[in-house]
Structures are given as structure tokens and as C-alpha cells.
Amino acid sequence: MTSASKRERLLIPAGILIAGLLLAALVYAGLTEIGGKNSAALMADAFLHGRLWVTSCFDLDCAHVDGRTYVVFPPFPGVAALPLVILGGATTFGFIPLAILCLFLSLLIWIRVFRKLGASNPAWFWLVLAAGFSSPLYFVTIRADGIWFFAQAIGFLMTSLALHEALAGRLLSAGMAIACAFLSRQMTIFYVPLLLILSMRTDTPLWTAMRDKVTPAVRLGLPVLAAIGIYMIYNQLRFGSVFESGYAFIDYPPGVLKQRLETHGLWSPSYVPFNLYHALVQGFHARFEGPGNMELVGMDRFGTAFLVASPWLAMLFFTPINRRTVYSGMLVAGLITVMLFYHSNGYTQYNVQRYMLDWLPAALIMMAYAIQRQTSPLFPLAVLWGMGLNAVTIATMAMVR
């Protein structure tokens, strides 16, 4: 056995060790979570009392209209929080444990998806570690005491479930899952065509496959249309317009977001340079201040570029061309491009670009095909790098808290 092969055999134990440390941090965060921080609880409390407005606001993303306060998020995070609120009231805790459950369910789903797409062991093992511990999914799980992160954990789970159900040909349940995802993260609506494509046999010509999918497509579309209708009515009842999500009514405190919105609005080409730089090249950035810039005070809250924090994404370059990967690639590119014009790149997020979670499920479909064409140990090393950066981030924030 060569020295190189001996070193390669250390990769899996290293992955298990780092994953164990990250899991321990999750458990600690769950055990020490403090209630009264997640506005999804306020939404759930409002639903239980037959109203849409909330009595207070735990964070910035609340709209004030006609003397009432509304959480601007779509309704499903509030629905998901109902069991916690029934048990503990509007100031309940338990969102991090619930997000940990979402993480494990998501990874179990992806094991099945990767294997169904042809990824063998240890390839799917590294793909699961990449998705769960070397991506923003880990960050939103450990920060799920805030509604922004909790909504993304829920949205990722529902999108993953929708993809799994589509691969199994169960388009009604796929539609129900993506409807729940849409009512958590609106951008997931663009997964609907991918679900239909995944349900088709790969060896059947597209036009022939589409003719056979008319009835299943209706099954897929009905829950989605119902979700769109629910969201539009939800907006109408809150803000007087089916197309008003409430962000126009947020009164941010003085700071970066307020300055941007007052100067450029919610969407603007002016945001592209900042967002593009942070999406592609911004490095891991610990902040030092004080005399001589020698005191560690935290991390850059605008995050690390996804190719730096999750370099294993470079494997997408080797994705083979088929109709599944082509639409997945279009979805990834489209969502990245759209969010370049948004006033916030995900702030706060430290070692990630958390909007990556909107397109990560599509990227993972591509990765399942790409990894079958590569035997290099560089992919596991890239996954370990991302896991290590997450561990360093958690340790850094623990030191400066």
C-alpha cells in the first residue's frame, strides 16, 4: 500500500470526527436555546387566536400597517411552529431541536436520492457530509432560533422531499411538498418543472414522456396552485394587495439595510457588485479590532463566498449533460443571478451565503451525476475543508460571544 493510499484511508475517519464535533455543537445549541427569539412562534400564536397580526416582534422583518404588526414571512414556518407554541406559548423555545430533526430527515432523504441517481458508496457518503455539514444547511440549523434560518431549514426539507417523491413518480405528494416549500421560501416555486422532469424516464424522448405526463402534471400542479392562492390571499388580507409581501412596510433601524432600501429600494442593479463579490470570491474573514487590530471580535456578517466555504461545488464542472442536469443547472444559474439584485445577500451569515440553500437541492442533483465520473480524493478533501471552516466558525463565535 502506497503512502498516498494510506492517507486516503484517513479521509472517512476525519469526516466522521468533524461531523461528530459539529453535531455536538448542534446538541449544545439546542440544549441552551432561549425562547422569545423566533417570530415563527408569534405567527403560530396568531393563527391559534384566529388572526394574522402579531402582538410583538422578535426581529427586524416585521411590517407595521394601520397600527398592527405583521411578520412578513410566508405562513408555513408559523404552521410548523404550532406544536411548539401549543406546548410553550408565544415565547417558546425548541426551534433548534426541530431544525436538527429537519436536518436528519433531509439527509435521510438525500441518501435515498443519491442512491437512486446511481451514486455508490463512498460517493453518497461524501455527498451527504457535503450537504449536511459543509454547506449553509448546517449554519441555518444551528441558528434556527431565528425565523430566517428556521424557514430555510423547513424549506430545504420540503424541497428535498419533493425531489424524492418526483423521482418515485408520486407527483401529488411532490406537489404537496413543494407547495409547503413555497410557503416557506418563495423561490422554490421554480422547482416545479424539475419535479416533472425527474418523474420522467431518462431513456424516453422528451416529447413522448411529456404526452404521458398530462394527468400526473395536473396532480403536481394542483397543490402548487393552491399554495399560490393561499399566499396571495394571505398577502391581500395583511397588506391589501396579493403581490405585496410586506417588505415595503418594514421600518429598519439605522444601519446598512435601511441605507440601502432608502437609496436603492428592495431590488436594484446597484447591489450586483457587492453581492457578486461575496457570492464568488469573498474569503473567510475573521474581524480583528482594538489597538493594532490585535483583538478578535467576530466575523464578517456578510459571509463567505460559496466556492470558498463549499469548494466541493467545483465538481459541478464535471456534470454530464442530460435533461435533468440541464434544467438543474439553469435553475442554479437563474436563482444565483436573480438574488444578485436583492438588497441583502443573506446578512447575517458569517461562513456561508445562505441563499445558496434555495438552489442547493438542484445542485445536489447535478452532483450525484458528476461524482460518478470522478475518482479523485480531491472531492472528499474539499468537503472536509468546508466542514473544517464551519467548525472554525462555531469556535470563533463561541470565543467572542
Image (spheres, helix red, strand yellow):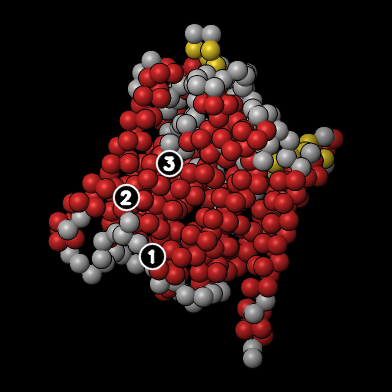
Q: Secondary structure at mark 1?
A: loop
Q: Of marks 1 and 2, which one's residue comes earlier in the chain?
A: 2
* Vertical order, 353 against 251 (above or below): below
Which residue carries the number 3 mark? Answer: 180
Disc 3 marks a residue whose amino acid type is Cys
Q: Are marks 1 and 3 in contact (CB under 8 Å)?
A: no
Work out how far the residue at label 2 is from the one at label 3, CA to CA, in angstroms.
13 Å
Which residue carries the number 1 mark? Answer: 319
Where is residue 12? Give x, y as percent.
63, 73
Quick one: quadrant of the C terminus? top right
Q: Residues within 10 Å of mark 3 (few under 14, many from 20)?
A: many
Q: Secondary structure at mark 2?
A: helix
Foreground residue among 172 and 10: 172
Mark 1 or mark 3, whichever is nearer to me: 3
Residue farthest toward the bottom in the current orientation of the protein:
1
* Vertical order, 383 against 274 (above or below): below
Give the label on residue 249, or none: none
Where is residue 370? Give x, y as percent.
42, 67
Q: Are marks 1 and 2 in contact (CB under 8 Å)?
A: no
User: Left of 83 or right of it: where is 232?
Assistant: left
Disc 2 marks a residue whose amino acid type is Leu
Disc 1 marks a residue whose amino acid type is Thr
Work out how far the residue at label 1 is from the one at label 3, CA to CA, in angstroms.
29 Å
> Can residue 350 be seen in this snapshot?
no
Which residue carries the number 2 mark? Answer: 172
Work out how far the residue at label 1 is from the one at label 2, CA to CA, in angstroms.
29 Å
Q: Residue at x 64, y 59 (%)?
A: 387
Foreground residue among 189 and 56: 56
Where is residue 371? Give x, y as percent.
45, 70
